[in-house]
Image (cartoon, helix red, strand yellow):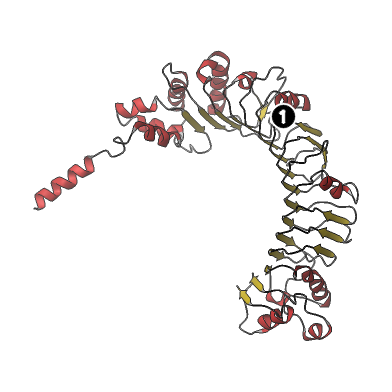
Amino acid sequence: MNGAKEYHERNTMQVDRISELPEHIIHHTLSLLPTIEVVRMCLVSKHWKRLCYKLTALQFSEFSMGQNLTQRNFPTFLRFFYLLMTRDEEPLVSKLKLELCSFTRRSISLRSWFNFVLTNRSDVLANLKELDLCVETSDCVENHLLPETVFRLRSLTLLRLCGVMLKGLEFVNLPYLKSLSLENVQLDNQVLHNLLTSCSSLENLLLKKIVDVWHLNVSSSSLTSLKIDTGGSFTSKVNVEAKNLQSFVFIGSFSYPSLKFLSPCETIRDLSLCRAYFLNDKGLQSLLLKLPFLESLALDKCFFPGVVTICSPHLRHFAFRGEIISKGLETTIDTPNLVSFSFEGYVEPKLSLIASNPLKASIKLYRREFECRDVYDTHWYSDLLNFLANFDCFRNVNLQVISEKALVFPSQCRRLSRPPLPTLKHLKVKVMSPLSKNHDLRDALFWASPSLETLLIE
């Protein structure tokens, strides 16, 4: 019996379960691995080597190699990588991802090889659907100049470029491109214009830290999703013209660039603004008037020079993140169809929220840097009462504070003031610091919201 059992276990261990899988499953599995790992697997058997030569997705990341590739064996790997790219038999490469450092010998060799393939063997990329090229550079290093041949790969549907330089681009032929990402790319508005006007199927566009562009102009009739992140660049003005845009995310920089829609964007449903600068009191409302069917709005650390008024009849989801940077003036939010509201920042005593029958409010309150964390005076509780009164119309309120003392209203305050949440039914409170064992917090919450049906304290 023991001999038969050992024979069975020995034969079970010798079975290559992976090689028995259908080839299309093996191809898909290998396409998810970095190419260097695939090269190792090719050394296992001739069968695996044959499968490796049929790879359609190639990935090379200099950041994940570590000590796996040395200056000595890198040329061998590069030759194998080149053979995979330039093989004559089908199928051709459909996905190529390259992540390189600034100026190492390996990255220079690979970039030279990549330029050679683009210039002399562009036929091997005739079926390329996705191209992801990232050259990690520092601010003092000139970005890598990308050959124009890239923009004539007609089959591309996704293109992501990082750390490269684009010049000229007089002839662009990307009729099927749907997603374009440009990060830390050096170009000018004319190059961007030539690129966008030549991509008639473009739907998703990401622009992050575009170098040497002071006034950024984005114009496209096919765009449905746009994200602009000025990063640490010195972009001072952003103009957008996209009549079919549905989702727009804007992240400004320390210079607070101004934002302007050059045409009505009636199709926009989702808008997120971070560090946006509005020149006057009516700046934000003028923007919202061009977005009559807006359903979701998020504002984070935006600058308002005066009174903030937000009126949007179709808005259903609204989020305030960070301090409302105005001049301490009133903030009025009139959104009759609001469903959910999220607030994260300091107590805003002059906030006025108007909503018919909202469902849920999520509130995270912080202390200002000059305020002592565990010291709460009458000004704090007075401002908090005025602030919380805006949320009595909600069915559910989630409230997060640093210390439970922030919500333990003094007895004198309870005698002289009305409860801020008299009709609220469901309240959840999360305290970041350890809770005490007394019932002061629970008693204070039941005073603030006497109609509570459920109360959860974490």
Q: Is residue 43 above or below residue 17?
A: above
Q: Secondary structure at mark 1?
A: loop
Identity, as a three-letter code, of the amino acid under mark 1: Gln
Residue 408: give x, y in percent of width and height.
72, 79
What residue is disc 1 on?
Answer: 186
Q: The C terminus lies in which quarter of the figure?
A: bottom right
Q: Position of residue 430 (x, y in %)?
A: 64, 70
* Image coordinates for residue 307, horizontal then vertical, percent: 89, 57
Can see residue 69? Answer: no
60 or 350: nearer the eye? 350
Q: Is residue 41 visible?
A: yes
- In the image, what residue occupies the spot 74% across and 58% down? 338
Q: Left or right: 21 with respect to 396?
A: left
Q: Residue at x 71, y 27 (%)?
A: 196
Whether residue 356 sits left or right of residue 162 in the image: it is right
Q: Quadrant of residue 413?
A: bottom right
